Image (cartoon, rainbow, N blue to C red):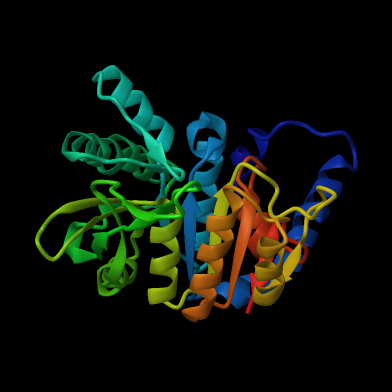
Amino acid sequence: MSPRDKDTLPSSAPGEASHQGMDTARTLSEALPFIRRYAGETVIIKYGGHAMGDEALGAGFAQDIVLMKQLGVNPVIVHGGGPQIGHMLQRLAIKSSFIGGLRVTDAATVEVVEMVLAGSINKQIAGRINRAGGRAVGLSGKDGDLIIAQKLHRTSRDPGSNIEKILDLGFVGEPKHINPEVLETILDSDLIPVVAPLGTSMQGETYNINADTAAGAIAASMVAKRFILLTDVPGVLDAQGKLLTGLSIEQAKKLIQDGTISEGMIPKVETCIHALKGGVEAAVIVDGRVPHALLLELFTDHGVGTLIRP
């Protein structure tokens, strides 16, 4: 730093600058073992919820992704966009309904889903990362046949007759096969991939895929070091509402069975379990509303969410 550079810095009280410098140096020193741990490793990040819709949090997320890349980590971002899709459907006067938390997606709806996910949202996230100094490229699961999908089947049982019937969700799919070579090629080019959770069938049909599910499948296919889900809650909570900082697969299954893990947290935990069984070292459910949640989770010894290990 030149004398002129120093002159442009804000003035500090005597000793204040040295204390700030010591704090910064101490933080970097404490992070060094974690930086070494993740250098050259792939980390899959499911990005969604309020963290994605908040401008300040979005800018902070982009900065954290760029820093991760600079530190040698290979981040892959898979994003959602349910609220944005719902807003666009309302603007276009297209009726939409849900079954079991999944949006029923007919031919008209899937066109809007693709327009919003692979268009405005995808490019907005990539643009934020680029403005933060990174080099992001946006794509969907349809590009390069990244995600080969199949129709998702759900059933329900009538409580009166006890007859099970098949629910038709339209163009809602689930990953059948992941081609990780697409993402590996991008990462080898020193770019940061931002993936919209769409897939294509063997017949060329477009399917809307739950972002958590898509991210977990990609994490398993790439045998990622970490699979991180950014949510709108602190993580998995116990029966008293306290954060559980660490779980095994068996402990997580028991909490689902006894009802402690319920509603929307169930598919998130099940996605983590699927990724772990696919070879991912650990999965983490993190509150994306916490500033710099990614850095706290990866580069400190305590983390900020629920870590699930095999």
The reply, left or right, for residue 247 in relation to residue 1 is: right
In the orientation shown, which residue stands out farthest toward the front? Answer: 161
Return the residue nearer the eye: 75 or 67. 75
Can residue 225 be seen by looking at this rendering? Answer: no
Q: Tell me the quarter of the picture where residue 253 sits.
A: bottom right
Percent of width and height locating residue 249:
64, 74
Percent of width and height locating residue 228:
55, 60
The reply, left or right, for residue 173 in relation to residue 16 is: left
Percent of width and height locating residue 134:
40, 51
Disc tally is 0
The reply, left or right, for residue 5 in relation to residue 218 is: right
Q: Residue at x 90, y 43 (%)?
A: 15
Q: Residue at x 76, y 62 (%)?
A: 245
Location of the C terminus by quadrant is: bottom right
Can residue 160 be seen by looking at this rendering? Answer: yes
Tell me: residue 287, above or below residue 177: above
In the orientation shown, which residue stands out farthest toward the left? Answer: 203
Q: Tell me the quarter of the picture where residue 78 sits.
A: bottom left
Return the residue nearer the eye: 208 or 118. 208
Percent of width and height locating residue 21:
78, 51
Q: Tell me the quarter of the picture where residue 301 sits.
A: bottom right
The reply, left or right, for residue 50 in relation to residue 219 is: right
Q: Residue at x 55, y 71 (%)?
A: 273
